[in-house]
Image (cartoon, rainbow, N blue to C red):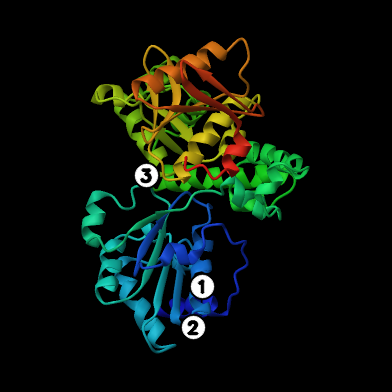
């Protein structure tokens, strides 16, 4: 194993990884942090965040041979076990002197990883570790790490980063110039195919779909079927399909279980709950709970997909309302917001940090304006919120109802705005 480790260490010294820098500069991620854990969905850009951090540190005078980068999904490390951790430093010190900086990619694949990086941190080493499991820093593991490793979430590209990947450097004046038409065109692509970096760099639909399918299969077969040792592939596929159909609606485990029974798919109710937890852990879907004090009511969650590209894989007919709502939810999560939905006599799509009410719809028209306005007004009244916003595909105006200000704004413009929400 030591010879393999030496080869991998030297390979990284000789590499010059190519990437498009995201808006979140690496110095912002690592400033003041001795060690950290970077968590997020597969292929969202965690590895490139490490490469950016390396280049930033090299720019500060750190030598290239000061880094140990290991990707634990490299097939050459397939036989690596927790007993091999000590060989990493031995391999490094047979090649170079000094105290290396550790970049450990997808380290959750190796048992005992938490104790190892805690030991490194206690010995004064700088450690950046990544993982694709949302429970990577569960309470138990966080205790083992002794509070030394803050967690940073990396998600697929936001819209401004997406434009950057397309070679379009956004400026505020573009909102008012003819360039806005190019922005809307890019937005349609982003809305449909999502923000995974590799997908953003592709130009044709067939290539995008091929890559998205490979991502989904990786999560489905490796993270779920294999790593979780799941036995009922048919049930899992059916559940994902139902969650896709139910975006924007409350979808309880009990309701999914009933659907499975009707489809004559044999699975127990406890298994359904467990599978949903696994889908969330694997960053395939994310929960949105209701704003409620009752524990029972809090279980009645909506669920959204981590990226619109995954929705495209299961799409029979495009539903722009559904795509817009999923996109707004994921953007709020990327902004670090606490998001709930309101369900009273009326319903409001999102309550953000108990300070903003948001409705999402393709268009406010005669057929739905009562529902959209009334749901928003009720939520604003309940949570004592002064302003509400309705995010649409292309409508923009401001209305005042009962002394409450409601703003209609295109989703693409909201994504690029400097609004704190």
Real-space Cα separation, disc 3 to disc 1, in angstroms: 37 Å
Residue that lies at the very extreme toward the right in this rendered image: 178
Label 1 vs 2, first from the N-terminus: 1
On the image, the x and y values in percent for residue 108 come to 37, 57
Picture layout, residue 174 above or below residue 78: above
Q: Along the line of sight, which residue is nearer the eye, 75 or 189?
A: 189
Real-space Cα separation, disc 2 to disc 3, in angstroms: 43 Å
Q: Along the line of sight, which residue is nearer the eye, 30 or 11?
A: 30
* Relative to 17, 28 lies left or right: left
Real-space Cα separation, disc 1 to disc 2, in angstroms: 9 Å
Tag shown at residue 56: 1
Tag shown at residue 228: 3
Say which of marks 3 and 1 sits in front. Answer: 1
User: Residue 210 appears in which quarter of the rendering?
Assistant: top right
Could one spot residue 41 in this view of the protein? yes
Residue drawn at 39 percent across, 17 percent down? 258
On the image, the x and y values in percent for residue 201 come to 68, 53
Q: Along the line of sight, which residue is nearer the eye, 235 or 44?
A: 44
Q: Secondary structure at mark 3?
A: loop
Q: Crowdedness of circle 2 by 10 Å Cα count: few (<14), some, many (20+)?
A: few
Picture layout, residue 354 above or below residue 34: above
Label 3 vs 1, first from the N-terminus: 1
Say which of marks 2 and 3 sits in front. Answer: 2
Residue drawn at 47 percent across, 53 percent down? 154
Tag shown at residue 305: none
Tag shown at residue 61: 2
On the image, the x and y values in percent for residue 160 come to 61, 49
Picture layout, residue 334 above or below residue 247: below
Residue drawn at 49 percent across, 65 percent down? 26
Q: Secondary structure at mark 2?
A: loop
State which quarter of the image contains the N terminus. bottom left
On the image, the x and y values in percent for residue 319 come to 62, 24
């Amino acid at each position: 194993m030591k010879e393999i480790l030496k080869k991998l260490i030297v390979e990284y010294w000789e590499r010059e990884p190519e990437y498009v820098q995201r808006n979140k500069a690496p110095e912002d991620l690592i400033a003041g942090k001795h060690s950290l854990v970077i968590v997020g969905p597969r292929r969202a850009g965690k590895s490139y965040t490490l490469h950016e951090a390396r280049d930033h540190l090299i720019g500060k005078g750190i030598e290239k041979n000061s880094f140990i980068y290991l990707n634990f999904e490299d097939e050459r490390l397939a036989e690596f076990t927790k007993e091999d951790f000590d060989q990493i430093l031995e391999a490094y010190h047979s090649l170079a002197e000094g105290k290396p900086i550790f970049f450990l990619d997808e380290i959750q694949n190796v048992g005992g990883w938490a104790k190892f990086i805690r030991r490194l941190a206690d010995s004064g080493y700088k450690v950046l570790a990544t993982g694709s499991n949302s429970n990577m820093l569960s309470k138990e593991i966080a205790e083992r790490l002794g509070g030394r490793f803050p967690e940073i979430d990396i998600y697929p590209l936001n819209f401004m980063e997406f434009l950057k990947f397309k070679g379009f450097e956004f400026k505020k004046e573009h909102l008012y110039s003819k360039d806005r038409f190019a922005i809307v065109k890019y937005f349609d692509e982003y809305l449909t195919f999502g923000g995974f970096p590799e997908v953003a760099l592709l130009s044709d639909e067939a290539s995008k779909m091929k890559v998205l399918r490979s991502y989904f299969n990786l999560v489905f077969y490796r993270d779920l079927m294999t790593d979780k040792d799941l036995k009922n592939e048919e049930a899992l596929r059916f559940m994902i399909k139902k969650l896709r159909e139910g975006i924007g609606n409350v979808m309880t485990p009990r309701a999914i279980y009933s659907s499975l029974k009707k489809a004559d798919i044999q699975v127990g109710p406890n298994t359904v709950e467990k599978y949903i937890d696994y889908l969330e852990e694997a960053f395939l879907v994310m929960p949105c709970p209701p704003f409620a004090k009752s524990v029972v009511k809090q279980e009645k969650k909506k669920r959204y997909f981590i990226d619109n590209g995954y929705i495209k894989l299961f799409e029979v007919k495009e539903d722009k309302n559904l795509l817009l709502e999923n996109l707004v939810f994921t953007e709020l999560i990327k902004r670090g917001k606490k998001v709930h939905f309101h369900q009273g006599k009326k319903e409001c799509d999102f309550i953000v940090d108990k300070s903003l009410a948001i409705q999402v719809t393709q268009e406010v028209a005669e057929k739905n304006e009562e529902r959209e306005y009334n749901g928003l007004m009720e939520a604003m009244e309940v949570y004592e919120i002064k302003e509400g916003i309705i995010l649409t595909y292309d409508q923009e105006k401001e209305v005042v109802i009962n002394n409450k200000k409601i703003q209609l704004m295109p989703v693409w413009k909201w994504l690029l705005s400097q609004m704190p929400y």
